[in-house]
Amino acid sequence: MPYRTGSPGTGRPVHDGDVVVLVTNGRFTQPAKEFAQTQRLHLVDRATLAAWAQGQPLWNLLHTVPHPRQPGAAP
């Protein structure tokens, strides 16, 4: 399948996501990193995934991911 730029995916339009995270157990290429920036996608590679799996909060690992809201708090 060819690499398609400008494809919005479903994270926001279909699933109404505030934060869209793409996870791999490998590494991201430089073009993938550049594309993710244009789409406001947060990338989790093998090293970040390992730290997340060991209990590190994602918002500490990806500094651009907001801290979760408290239940009942206004968006």
Image (cartoon, rainbow, N blue to C red):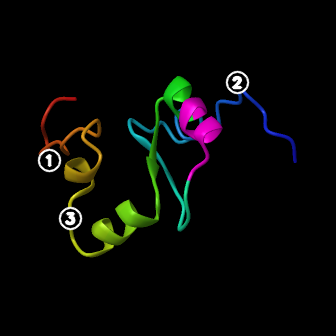
Indicate the position of residue 62 as horizontal and vertical percent values: 29, 46
Whole-angstrom CA distance, mark 3 to mark 1, is 21 Å
Whole-angstrom CA distance, mark 2 to mark 1, is 34 Å
Which residue type carries mark 1?
Pro
Q: Which residue is mark 2?
A: 6
Residue span colored magenta: 28-35
Q: Residue 54's mark?
A: none
| Mark toward the viewer: 3 or 1 | 3
Q: Is residue 33 magenta?
A: yes
Which residue type carries mark 2?
Gly
Q: Quadrant of the C terminus?
A: top left
Indicate the position of residue 25 as horizontal and vertical percent values: 53, 68
Disc with the residue nearer the chain's start (2 vs 3): 2
Q: Quadrant of residue 58?
A: bottom left
Q: Nearer the viewer, residue 30 or 64?
A: 30
Residue shown at 39% from the left, 65% from the top: 47
Q: Nearer the viewer, residue 69 or 27?
A: 27
Q: Are marks 2 and 3 in contact (CB under 8 Å)?
A: no
Q: What type of secondary structure mainly makes up the magenta span?
A: helix
Q: Which residue is mark 1?
A: 71
Mark 2 neighbour class, 10 Å CA radius: few under 14, some 14 to 19, many 20 or more: few
Give left or right: position of 74 versus 31. Answer: left
Q: Which residue is mark 3?
A: 56
Q: Nearer the viewer, residue 16 or 67?
A: 67
Give left or right: position of 1 versus 53. Answer: right
**Residue that extends furthest to the bottom in the rendered view of this protein:** 54
Q: Is residue 53 magenta?
A: no
Q: Are marks 3 and 1 in contact (CB under 8 Å)?
A: no
Disc with the residue nearer the chain's start (3 vs 1): 3
Disc with the residue nearer the chain's start (2 vs 1): 2
